[in-house]
Image (spheres, rainbow, N blue to C red):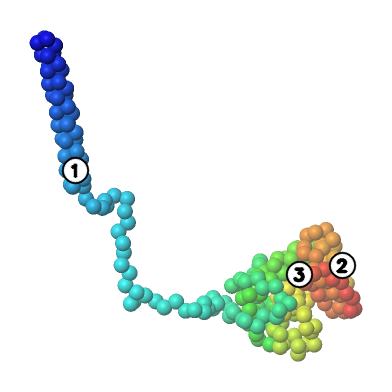
Amino acid sequence: MNIKKTAFISIIAFLIVIAVYFIWRYVRYRTTIIVQEEERPETSTIGTITPVIIDSTNMPIIPTTIPLPTNTLGPIYSNIPSHCMENYATVAGTANFSESEFASRDGSTTPNQLKGNLQLLMQQLEVIRAAAGNKPVTVSSGYRSVAHNAAEGGAAKSKHVCCQAADIKIAGMSANKVYDLIAQLIESGQIINGGLGKYNTFTHYDISTSRRWDYS
């Protein structure tokens, strides 16, 4: 009986020691966690963005209406005819043609919104000039302001006011031959299939829709 009692007491004592040991380890673990959390900063500077305070007192005022761009090569007009396709450029010119040759005869400046059309027209005329053996091409009428077109009795929706048309003469060639040459270039796909008109002393060509007429 004494042996069993002694063994029982020993087991109880052993279990108490084990329990005390694990309680001690747990208390130590929790104490370490609490200390680490107290030493940790509230916020970290790693991966954060420092706020920037902007002083708006000296900032420029942005206008509610943004002005159209301007330059010294030609003004921006707000009254471009509604039938005209706008094609903005600040300058137009090719190897054998310059803006001055297409200027409106009343002295009006060619609008920048239409100079892209003029550039494309010049490129077609370069092809025509080359096909004519590089003979000089004279532009008798290029761009026309709305006022000048009306004074000349031009059509209300003339392509001249859109910088898309030119009345031309080629040295050493009749108007009929110039007309036929342009028609051949259009047929072969070398230039834009636009408007082509035959007159007694000149030939009209434009880069708008395909049309043909004969006023000779």
> Residue 113: image x %, image y %?
63, 75
Q: Are dots 3 and 2 in contact, CB under 8 Å?
A: no
Q: Quadrant of residue 119?
A: bottom right
Tell me if residue 174 can be seen. no
Dot 2 lies on which element?
helix
Labels 1 and 3: the sequence-earlier one: 1
Q: From the viewer's perspective, tell me whether residue 88 is left or right of residue 187.
A: left
Type of amino acid under label 2: Asp
At x 9% / y 10%, what residue is drawn?
Answer: 2
Between circles 3 and 2, the one closer to the viewer is 3
- Name the foreground residue: 1 vs 202: 1
The image quarter in which residue 186 lies: bottom right
Query: Where residue 28 sits: x, y (%)?
Result: 15, 35
- Whole-percent x, y for residue 128 in the image: 77, 65
- Residue type, mark 3 in image: Ile
Q: Is residue 186 left or right of residue 143?
A: right
Q: For mark 3, what is the residue?
A: 207
Q: How far apart are marks 1 and 2 (CA)?
A: 98 Å
**In the displayed image of the protein, which residue is found farthest to the front?**
1
* Crowd class of label 1 (few under 14; some 14 to 19; many from 20; radius 10 Å): few
Displayed quadrant of residue 61: bottom left
The residue type indicated by label 1 comes to Ile
Q: Are marks 1 and 2 in contact (CB under 8 Å)?
A: no
**Residue beneath label 1, please?**
34
Residue 157 in the image, given as x and y percentages of width and height = 77, 80
- Label 2, on which residue? 180
* Cα gap from disc 3 to disc 2, whole angstroms: 17 Å
Residue 83 in view (yes/no): yes
